[in-house]
Image (cartoon, helix red, strand yellow):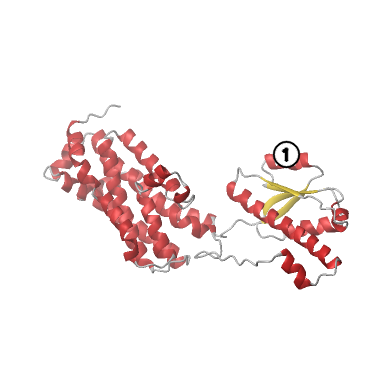
Amino acid sequence: MKREWGILTMRPLYVFCMVIAPLFCNIFFTTMMSDGLPHDLPAGVVDMDHSALSRTLQRNLDAFAQTGVSANYPSVKEAREAMQRGETYGYFYIPENFSEDVQSFRQPRISFYSNYSYLIAGSLLFRDMKTMSELTSGAAARSQLYARGATERQAMAYLQPIVVEPRAVNNPWLNYSIYLSNLLLPGVLSLLIFMVTVASIGMEIKYETVGDWLHLSGDSLSVALVGKLLPQTLIFTIMGVFYNVYLYSYLGFPCNSGIFPMLVATFCLILASQALGILMIGVFPSLRLGLSFASLWGVLSLSIAGFSFPAIAMPEAVQVASLLFPLRHYYLLYVAQALNGYSMIFGWTHYLALLLFMLLPFIIAPRLHHSLYHYKYIP
């Protein structure tokens, strides 16, 4: 351990990957999404009617929190080109004679277009424009019913026979920072653990210092690994405690089970990630291949964990493969404990899975021991 502390302090790369990068990501992601949802996304309007009704429609669309009408275009061609240049994320088209057709009950057609190349911006803008079109349609239909002598109660019962009350569970604010930060931060930490674990062992092979390392351990691979990784475990645990306190105590993110179960889940994720890192360098004792494997596995974790796209909607083979990623089990523990407030006992299967990850070094130990003595680094 004393030797490892010396290595960690002598090489700035370790300080960057273990302290600076996690802290930077914690601040960067949470401040980038500090408002929860993006506001005033630029949208264009093509108003071919130029009536009081069409202007009211524009003002109502601009009143949505996520949408800001930034420009009026004289034609669809110019609005489309502005959207392709990235000046707007979509545009709303009001046809000619719109007001007259509404008053004459001729069912005018309004159109809206959003750029789904930007998924979040496009989907939020699409939602607001669709809501605006539905409100406009409902208002026109209500005016027709009033003209035919219907009361307000009768008109509303016809337009909306079933009233739906949507309630967002555990994140009623629809805060994107709550949705993303709770998994991006441990996901980045897990990726860094993979790479630091692989690099710390791989550099022993590359610089041919394996003999010194194993000599201090009495030629015991288990003692050598524990001595090398324990200082890293301590530093990563401090980083894990920091982001948990930062998210749940300072920022006030939902944590219905208390912070202790999340600290336990974080510690299990750290140990499981280190164990998987040992497996990676054991399978590929080359520093280049080991780091490539670690980076690929870490990046895939963010996609396959299930927080950006539900795992149950993935193909069955991918659903099974998702269980091979520690972050997937951490995510399910986060949902069960922090969001739903369940006791730790309800997540025992995922704790068991993380424990099984910790046993991986015992499986790869013979191959790793052989590689440490016989693998020759080729530049």
Q: Quadrant of residue 300?
A: top left
Q: Amino acid at mark 1?
A: Glu
The residue at 33%/54% (across/down) is: 269
236 on left or right of 41: left
Residue at far left of view: 218
Q: Is residue 98 left or right of residue 266?
A: right
Viewport quadrant of the C terminus: top left
Q: Nearer the viewer, residue 43 or 213?
A: 43
Q: Describe the element under mark 1 as helix, strand or loop.
A: helix
Q: Residue at x 60, y 45 (%)?
A: 118
Residue drawn at the location 74% of the way across and 68% of the way down: 156
Count every numbered label the image shows and give the total.
Answer: 1
Q: Nearer the viewer, residue 72 or 30?
A: 72
Would you place residue 232 above or below residue 294 in this image?
below
| Along the viewing direction, whichever of 65 and 225 lies nearer the viewer | 65
**x%, y% of residue 136?**
76, 58
Task: Measuring from the top left, give residue 244's x and y in whole percent.
Answer: 40, 62
The x and y percentages for residue 111 are: 75, 48
Q: How far across and down, in percent of the image, does residue 88 sit?
A: 69, 46
> Callout 1: 10 Å neighbours few (<14), some, many (20+)?
few
Q: In the image, is 76 to the left or to the right of 270? A: right
Is residue 304 visible to us here? yes
What residue is pinned by disc 1?
A: 81
- The answer to whether residue 17 is visible is no
Residue under the image location 28 percent in, 56 percent down:
352
Which residue, as the protein is rendered here, is positioned at the far top?
A: 378
